[in-house]
Amino acid sequence: MTRPTSLEQTSPPGTVPAGRAATTAESLHRPRISRTAVTMILLAAPCVVLLLLINAYPLVVAASQSVRDGTLIVTGDFVGLGNYADVLTSPRFWSAARFTLIFTIGGVFGSWLVGLGLALLLRTKIPGRTAFKVLLMLPWVVPIVVSSTAWNWLVGTPTSPIPTLVAQLGLGEVHFLADPTLAAVTVCVFKVWVSFPFMMLMTSAALAAVDTTVYEAAGIDGASRRQQFVHITLPLISRTTYISWILMTIFCVNDFPTIYLLTGGGPVDATSSLVVLAYRTVFQDLQTGPGVAIAFLMTLVLVIVSTALYRQIRKVDIA
Amino acid sequence: MNRGKVTRRGFLGLAGAAIAAPALAACNVSGNSGGSKAGDASGELKFWDMPWGAPQYNVLGKKIVDGYTPAQGFGKASYQIIQWNGFYQTFSSAIASKTGPAVSSGAGFQAFQFAEQGQIAYADNFIEALKKDGTYDDFLPGVIDTMKTDKGYVAVPWQTDVRPFWYNKALLDQAGAKVPTTWDELLTAGQALKKIGVSGFATGSGTGNSFGVQAMVAMMINNGGGLFDADGKPDCVTDANIQAMEFVKQLANEGIIDKGAVSYTVENLDGQWNTKKAAIGIHTPGLADRAAKVADDLLVAAPLKSPSGTAAGLFYVNNLMMYTNTPSQEASEAFLKYYLGQLHTYWENPVGMAVPVLKSITTADYYTKDPNQVAIVEKWIPVCKTFAATGTQSFAALAAVDGGQALVQFTQTMLQGKTDPKAALTTLQRGLEGVVRR
């Protein structure tokens, strides 16, 4: 038995009432929304309304806050683009933008390189491979609060294990989180450590989809391992690579806990990213307008970068 | 129509109603603190409290609130713990949605902040009542006045969070140093301690650690300076402040302040005290509890005499505030009166509290058995000033100043010991002007 596809089809053929015949005939010539479509729209409406309430409403409120000088409670007066102008002329904003860029580049490519290396390594048949996979996933699985506490314990004070080891190697007293340059490096390394399992997982999945006969053919043709990697592996996993780069870029730009829990954005703003700056501006300086303006500018940049990377994926698809 | 069958239209209607019902119910939530109709004094009164001490503190707090027997016509009180992490967001969103507390404890300048936004019920009548029944005289001198603004008293003090100098006597003895009473002596002691690998000015300014900020402000206040002038305007670049920061820079450059201090969290700093890497430093009244491994060696020093001849310190006056969103102001005041009467419980059953503001507690046997707490009450509180120094009144913007980016960055700059103090103070001045202006 076939199911009716629309309400019109539920009436048996030839049973259209005489009075409605003309209307039905007209409707054949006039495009109109079917009752099925109306039903579907009505069924979808609650979800759409809910999504709008969850996503669009906060966005609109935030946009309104970014052009006002209010607080979290009081709306405040309209100041136009004053907050944006203040933010864009603030050295602190550009310092945070610079660190965000470093952190993102370091985080994306650092974690990708480590993830790719480990994914390739895990393709080889070694004993305990599954156990290794599980262990390597731990940095991604462990809550960031726990791992940041662990890292702070590892590097926080001169008597922590790593500074002690460094001192015993004769490299002197090193303050990993107190020196601005070292703190920036430590935060980036921490991000790579947290993120490489994700990259490893993505790359492993892409590598699993590569037909091994391609390598056999290339081997017969005399391609070296390096040539196989550069000319076969990388192009074949490029789609996944671009997707993982987009995702990791978004993760890095929006990453608050990794930085804030380890350094709080210090010392002297050396590790303050845009998202940390936005948070501190809103919740420490209690300046809602400028803080939200930073978040909006950040989103704008993120959209541009993501779009550029997405176009790259389309190019790969076309190729 | 076929009875018993649900048509598509009917189904849609039901679904719509099902979605709308909770939404309408949510919209219908009373704006009243107790969830009952505004102005109904018999509604439940919400009391929000922070984790002020050990976990046992909140257990005790709940017990006190549960023990409240309201007078005829007033509702009972409920107890809610609000974590420090994100407390401002919690309070702000609750107040904005009219679901906040009627009475609460909170951050030192929270009452000033919310008063500016019209959310605080001024305590003038309550304080008048305290004067009449004699409770007012039980407060330590001057503490109630720290709550005063041009519009009235924004809250009622219940404890003071002093920042005294502590020292580890055993480490000082080991270094052959004497307990400092002046800045010069602090420097000499620090140099001696440095030789045995111990910090003579322990502090930290890492994530969530405000001891560094407080140490900087305390040193300015100690030297007769402060962040503001008498009118409450930022006034950082003063001779007293420059001299204080020159001294801090010297401490940093001579290694008396640990090179890593700039990134030390509270836990890192506690660890330094516990592992005997810290011998002198500005900390909370509860340091001996936090550094339990060396508690027996820890003593409170007297306020140092500064080069300008002053000997002042920094304190926060923690307070209990009443909100306009309440079942009734009388109900809030009745509860607050009851709660003040129960404060002694927190010190009778030590739960890691700061210093009480009531003389009846500071002079009680259970309190005076700890000489460090007595020293804080007798030597420090009389000379302590608030973050508003050299101004006399606190104000809302202090909430953004204390722990704000400008002061944190300034502190971290000073702890690195590289920047000229006058230049750093000038940057701080600009930063504070930006915050206070808004």
Image (cartoon, grey):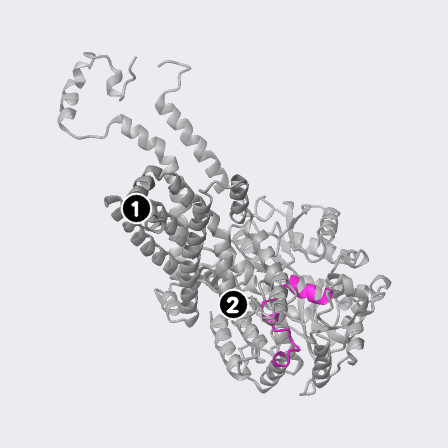
In the image, residue B240 sits, relative to residue A1, either above or below, namely below
Q: Is residue B376 left or right of residue B78?
A: right
Q: Amino acid at mark 1?
A: Gly
In the image, residue A81 sits, relative to residue B378, either above or below, namely above
- Separation (CA) of disc 2 from disc 1: 45 Å
Q: Which mark is residue B370?
A: none
Residue bearing the label numbered 1: A222
Residues in magenta?
B252-274
The residue sitting at 70% across, 66% down in the picture is B160
The residue sitting at 52% across, 39% down in the picture is A130
In front of the other: B433 or B249: B249
Whole-percent x, y for residue B50 in the image: 65, 55
Q: Is residue B222 left or right of residue A305?
A: right
Q: Quadrant of the N terminus of chain A?
A: top left
Helix or strand or loop: what does disc 1 sit on? Answer: loop
Helix or strand or loop: what does disc 2 sit on? Answer: helix
Residue bearing the label numbered 2: A182
Q: Nearer the viewer, mark 2 or mark 1?
A: 1
Q: Earlier in the sequence, mark 2 or mark 1?
A: 2
The reply to whether residue A251 is visible in this rendering is no
Tell me the chain of label 2.
A
Whether residue B259 is in magenta: the answer is: yes
Tell me the chain of label 1.
A
Whole-percent x, y for residue A241 in the image: 36, 48
Q: Amino acid at mark 2?
A: Leu
Task: Sort mark 1 into few (<14), some (14-19) or many (20+) by Cα contacts within 10 Å.
Answer: few
In front of the other: A240 or A222: A222
